[in-house]
Amino acid sequence: MKVKIHRLFEYLLETVEAQPEAIVGFSLSESPKLGAFLEELDPELSLDWNNRDFRGLPELRDHVLRQAGLDGVLTPADVLITAGAAEANYLAVMQRLEPGDRIVVESPGWPQAEVLAKAIGAEIVRVNRREEDGWRMPLDRMREAVTPATKMIFVTNPNNPTGDVMDEATLRALVQIADGVGAWLLVDEVYAGLEWDGPRAPSVAGMYARGITTGSVSKALGLQGLRTGWLICPDPELVMDAVILRENSSEIMNIMGEVIAEVALRPERLAPAMEKARAEGQANLAQMNDWVAAQDGLSWVLPRAGLIGLGKLPNGLDSDAFATRLLEDPYRTFLLPGSAYHQPQHIRLGVGGGAGVNLGKGLSRVAQALKDWKDGAWS
Ligand SMILES: Cc1ncc(COP(=O)(O)O)c(C=O)c1O
């Protein structure tokens, strides 16, 4: 089993030394500084592991259940603290998918499950979300794709990269489809809490015996570098299998990630942090929407949640060529090409990252690049 590179990571590797002057398409809120947490940290804290539970600090797991609306529904034993949602996804996919199994994924969507499934030798079936349908989850196509050979359905809610949100009714329909064949339903909720035109969707771990919810403090709270996330599942065997695989990869959580995330998720800290993230995200997205409307040939479906969406380029302009040109003088601006999501005519637009990404400058550079590209050539 060899894990092969995906276009999304390949592009990040290719461009990491480009030193852009602006970034358009950042997917997380501005990251807080360590100083914001120092007062709550105990200098006597041992930098050994937490010495209490292999699933993670109990009070942190309580917070995780509360923020997901699952307190009283599930217990802390159903929660495993992980190195980000990425590790949670990894542990679940690796421990439940075998060669020849079918996994159904959405497209566009987060590529991680597909990358792992390919390495395992599973059969990957993509269910396409379509722009003309507002990137909504196509339940009819999902129903067709899920067969008795299907071991897992992997989706994001809110969706990366389109910002679509599945509501409770849609999730219930998905549960029904998964339950019909006994498949695991993994819903990656890493962007939860940033819904703009409806409530936060319920977490699937509270809706289905084979429902797996993954999430983290990376996005709305901007705490990506803590590498702290979670897996929630009512199936004790799945949680234990994840603990076992983790023991044989990174063994334990990093204690600083656990302790700082515990502080960040305390209700009295979480509420104002989310309020700030929501206010900034919403205002910035409104500006982005106006900017998109003002560009000749560029369009998008306004994200219903999260800080990113897909912008459609003018006909004939390829996303790889555009993103690569944009990194060069005089534009020096980074964005992700849609090729990273099997959408070669789109670019990922986003408003995260705070002041450090120089979004305004980036947008005017993208606008200039769009003007400079005419009739299939750069002027
Ligand atoms: C949908 C999705 N899942 C998981 C991750 C990984 O997040 P984390 O930092 O929690 O590992 C990302 C990061 O971009 C993501 O967009």
Image (cartoon, helix red, strand yellow):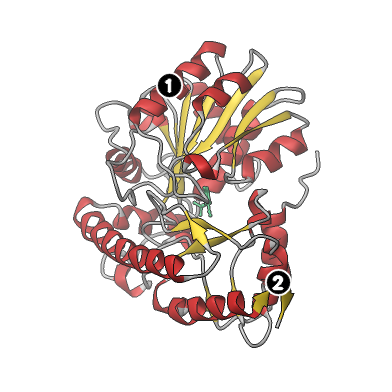
Quarter of the image where the C terminus is located: bottom right
Residue at the image position 45 percent from the left and 48 percent from the top:
229
Choose between 116 and 324: the one closer to the eye.
Answer: 324
Secondary structure category for the residue under label 2: loop
Side of 207 relative to 139 (left or right): left
- Rounded to the nearest whole Å, what is the CA distance between mark 1 and mark 2? 45 Å
- How packed mark 2 is, by other alpha carbons closer than 10 Å (few <14, some 14-19, many 20 or more), is few
Instruction: Identify the residue position indicated by label 1 in the image.
Output: 173
Indicate the quadrant containing the N terminus: top left, top right, bottom left or bottom right.
top right
Instruction: Give whichever of discs 1 and 2 has the lower sequence position.
Output: 1
Q: Where is residue 301 in the image (x, y as percent from the top left)?
A: 45, 52
- Compared with 291, 21 (above or below) is below
Which residue position holds label 2? 375
Dot 1 lies on which element? Answer: helix
Image spot of residue 287 (x, y percent) = 35, 69
Question: Relative to 172, does residue 282 appear above or below in the rendering?
Answer: below
Residue 178 vs 62, above or below: the answer is above
